[in-house]
Amino acid sequence: MSNKGKTQTARGRTPRFLVVLFAASMLTAAACGSSATEAESQVDGSIESETTTVATEPEEDARPSAADLIGTWERSNGVTWAIGDDMIFVTGGAVDSFNYSATDTTIELIDKACGEELPGTYEWAIADDVLSLVLVTDRCEGRNTGLGGSSLERTE
């Protein structure tokens, strides 16, 4: 029998330093949280690799985007806002609708009663399906008193 490719002593045993070296490399791999069997396995002379994908949760304090405004919202007084891409349809309020544009932090409202020359700007935030509006600037008397500091709960 040939011993070609094997390191052995005169008595046919593997030298102790190779055993220690092999054990140390296995301990290092285990300490790093991996092993040869996790990353690769040899079957019938071929090597197979495994890939693991880890899903991560979104950050809890991630800021909503303007697209998160779209939906149906209701104020505590029963007024309902149906927010679409660029219109807000109001049921039960002083106005029928608003044109709006939004960034990830502000919303600008324009309605027929106040006209385009008096847009209102409000900071908005959503937490636990509640939309909060905080007055930034709005010279339209009826709108700024009706909306400043208001909150709406998502219904759809």
Image (tube, rainbow, N blue to C red):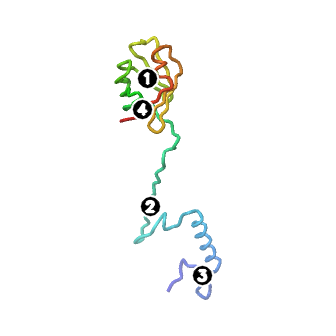
The x and y percentages for residue 84 are: 36, 27
Q: Is residue 51 above or below residue 84?
A: below
Of mark 3 and mark 2, the one earlier in the sequence is 3
Q: Nearer the viewer, mark 3 or mark 2?
A: 2
Q: Which residue is mark 2?
A: 50
Q: Residue at left 41%, top 70%?
A: 43
Per the image, label 3 sits on a secondary structure element best described as: loop
Q: Point out residue 92 in the picture as x, y percentages from the top left corner.
A: 35, 23
| Quarter residue 76 falls in | top left
**Distance from Cα at disc 1 to Cα at disc 4:** 11 Å
Query: In the depicted view, which residue is nearer to us: 44 or 24?
Result: 24
Q: CA distance from mark 3 to mark 4?
A: 67 Å
- Residue linked to disc 4: 67
Q: Is residue 25 above or below residue 53?
A: below
Mark 1 surroundings within 10 Å by alpha-carbon count, few (fewer than 14), some (14 through 19), many (20 or more): some
Amino acid type assigned to the residue bearing label 2 in the image: Glu
Give the residue number, with chain letter if any, for mark 1. 101
Q: Mark 4 or 2 closer to N-term?
A: 2
Give the labeled residue for mark 3: 14
Of residue 131 and residue 74, the one placed in the foreground of this image is 74
Q: CA distance from mark 4 to mark 2?
A: 38 Å
Question: Of discs 1 and 3, which sits in the foreground?
Answer: 1
